[in-house]
Image (spheres, rainbow, N blue to C red):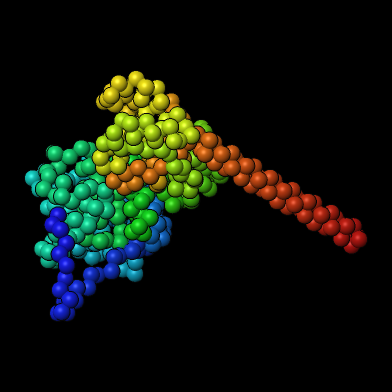
Amino acid sequence: MSEPTSAPTTSPQPEASPQPAAASGATIQLENLTKRYPGNPNPSVDDVSMEIKAGELVVFVGPSGCGKSTTLKMINRLIEPTSGRIRIGDEDVTDMDPVKLRRKIGYAIQSSGLFPHMTVAENIALVPKMTGWSKSRAKDRVEEMLDLVGLDPREFHGRYPRQLSGGQQQRVGVARALAADPPVLLMDEPFGAVDPITRDHLQDELIRLQHELHKTIVFVTHDFDEAIKLGDRIAVLRERSHIAQFDTPEAILTNPADDFVSGFVGAGAALKRLNLTRVRDVEIAEFPTVSVDDPLQQIFNTLRAGQGNELLMLDRRGRPYKWLRRGDLMRAKGSLARAGQLVHDTVTRDATLHDALEAVLTDSGGRVAVTGRRGEYIGVVDMETLMNSVHEMLEADRLTAAEHAHDLEELRHHRVERDLEGLRDGSEGS
């Protein structure tokens, strides 16, 4: 990147061409949506009706073969519905040109779906160019989208998909889906093919992006924990996409509609509620840090000046690198190359308390480093903070249960009084 030059002060600067406003989400309405395949007596999707609010992230979750992906693909008409209507915003898109429709809807799938013969930049710019964007605007958009998903444009612009890790490919896939600024984003098990740690970070990234962009997102998964973590609302689907329950994660966890939904919630509903609170909602503490480039004596001085027995060493990009204890420094003998414990796990501010607790429990130090969108160090969350949050959550649950029991008792009391009043009126009339 070139150094900025100072602008002349004597001549007026040309006005920057106005950029179009970013598209926020659009309402999606499915009306009696049905899909039948020849030779099959039963529909794959049967008479589904639902409304997804603008800017909402809705998750379809259900057993394999229940029709959740088919329902998703009918929204952008990758699968044509047999009957029913689809409305996006104020527009009935059931009969419009499906190619034009798909250019207005972002689509991200498992294993990213990137074109292997195109560079990262070419993949991201594909839909903007197809919809008539100029070369310069598309180029600017590529850089903007790479930055948005936490990839350095200078590093990744000219790479090919085969040169990326699985997590990086998925980030580029999301960037491509959002490049033309669609109001609606469809995601079909997009994180299903990556390892659990990468998956957690990709989920956090999606939460952060949605926090900034407010798109309408429909997300398909078979993982109920993922649904709880991501969804504003969850549609639990039975066979043929019949809706068993369509509600907030909290409502489904605390009050499942029936045994089928309870089976999806599974054991440990109270612990699953840790997926409803983010790291950003609790106290992120400061922790003494040093840099990998700091002289050994300076590191000693920092440790002596602190109240604890441990430091966090950051790499040259300010990312967590090693936990260093006093004993490590005493044994260093002039070099820290082999001293300390490498940082194996971090969480972002958009991670859930469940993610943070898991990371803390697998670390002997009882804490986890919190990082920003490019992995830079922000602070730490420790076991005490997490346990206090759990206790507060359980106390709130107890109060809610007590209020519910009180309301039920009041209702029972009123019913008894009403019945007694009816008996009295009946006896007086006779």
Residue with the most extreme left position:
117
Residue at horizontal 30 percent and vertical 62 percent from the top: 183
Q: Observer-nearest residue: 11 or 377?
A: 11
Q: Is residue 69 above or below residue 102?
A: above
Residue 112: quarter of image: top left
Residue 314: which quarter of the image? Answer: top left
Q: Position of residue 120 (x, y in %)?
A: 14, 48
Image quadrant of residue 279? top left
Nearest the eye: 378 or 94: 378
Residue drawn where x is 34% and y is 66% of the image: 89
Residue ID at (40%, 57%): 56
**Quarter occupied by the C terminus:** bottom right
Residue at the location (56% across, 39% down)? 388
Q: Residue furthest bottom?
A: 11
| Relative side of 384 to 94, left or right | right
Q: Which of 108 and 43 is in front in this view?
A: 108
